[in-house]
Image: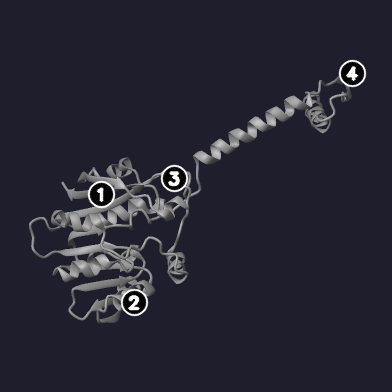
């Protein structure tokens, strides 16, 4: 009885909290004996100060826990349709040109895999050097634009195993599968001498990183070189994609079964990144090899 009465009293205090001249009182009876108790009301200034402090704490807490974007296949296809493809580059990536020998690993011709390849010009660049390229991309628009823009003749055919299609150049050097990335596996096109991951890892949903990494490992031949490009920035300012992917995360995902070499780091901040509110962005290049 007393406990319930005090709860009621607290409610009364809250109702009168902004009128410090009023002092709410309650009357109750215990074993037939009447009681009267008046509650002290906090000054309005102290209440407002406490409310402000709590709001500030909530704001800081929210800033430390940003809500990251999660995209599915349909949403990626929509981005291509709406031309939200700021990740696409019109030139071959600097790291690929500079460190191609690390991927070749003393071989003249290699089989290269490109996850989430889009319409990357890197595909044509590698094929022109005599290498075979296999890519996976969920957007048919991206693949059609690649072949059209690069003036490469191609054919298409259904691939039931991935519930998608294969876009193949006439000379057979370029094979691009249009499907959900996680529907792809080594039984579809074998394993590879090299993997070029320029913008896939940073685009993958954070919750899919382990699954993604495991799939890439399964596609690696024993002497495969996996070339990985990551971005590091203040993730509280941008929900992604692309996502912040610090070196600790790379090593956590790969070092148990692979050797990880961080080869180079450079300033990757561009105007579109500044539009996200970023003042710095670091682009890192790794070479990963099976132990």
Whichever of labels 2 and 4 marks the residue nearer the N terminus, that label is 4
The mark found on residue 95 in the picture is none
The mark found on residue 35 in the picture is 4
Residue annotated with mark 1: 285
Whichever of labels 2 and 1 marks the residue nearer the N terminus, that label is 2
Residue annotated with mark 2: 144
Residue occupying the far front of the picture? 271
Q: Nearer the viewer, mark 2 or mark 4?
A: 2
Circle 2 Cα neighbour tier, 10 Å, few/some/many (<14 / 14–19 / ≥20) = some
Q: Position of residue 263 (x, y in %)?
A: 21, 46
> Quadrant of the image for the N terminus?
top right
Residue annotated with mark 3: 235
SS label for mark 4: strand
Quadrant of the rendered image containing residue 187: bottom left
Whichever of labels 4 and 3 marks the residue nearer the N terminus, that label is 4
Q: Evaluate if marks 4 and 1 touch, with contact meaning CB atoms under 8 Å apart.
A: no
């Amino acid at each position: 009885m007393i406990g319930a009465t005090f709860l009621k009293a607290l409610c009364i205090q809250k109702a009168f909290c902004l009128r410090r001249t009023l002092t709410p009182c309650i009357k109750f009876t215990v074993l037939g004996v009447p009681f009267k108790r008046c509650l002290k009301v906090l000054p309005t200034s102290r209440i407002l100060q406490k409310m402000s402090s709590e709001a500030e704490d909530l704001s800081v807490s929210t800033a430390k826990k940003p809500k990251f974007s999660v995209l599915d296949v349909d949403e990626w296809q929509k981005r291509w349709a709406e031309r939200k493809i700021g990740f696409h580059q019109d030139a071959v990536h600097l790291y690929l040109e500079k460190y191609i020998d690390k991927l070749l690993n003393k071989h003249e011709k290699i089989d290269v895999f490109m996850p989430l390849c889009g319409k990357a010009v890197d595909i044509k660049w590698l094929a022109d050097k005599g290498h075979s390229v296999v890519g996976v991309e969920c957007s048919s628009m991206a693949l059609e634009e690649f072949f059209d823009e690069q003036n490469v003749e191609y054919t298409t055919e259904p691939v039931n195993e991935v519930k998608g299609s294969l876009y193949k150049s006439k000379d057979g050097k370029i094979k691009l599968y249009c499907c959900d990335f996680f529907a792809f596996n080594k039984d579809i096109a074998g394993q590879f001498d090299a993997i070029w991951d320029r913008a896939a890892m940073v685009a993958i949903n954070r919750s899919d990183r382990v699954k993604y990494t495991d799939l890439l490992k399964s596609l690696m031949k024993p002497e495969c070189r996996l070339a990985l490009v990551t971005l590091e920035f203040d993730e509280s300012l941008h929900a992604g994609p692309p996502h912040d992917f610090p070196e600790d995360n790379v090593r956590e995902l790969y070092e148990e079964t692979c050797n990880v070499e961080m080869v180079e780091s450079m300033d990757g901040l561009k105007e579109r990144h500044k539009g996200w509110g970023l003042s710095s962005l670091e682009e890192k290049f790794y070479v990963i090899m099976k132990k």
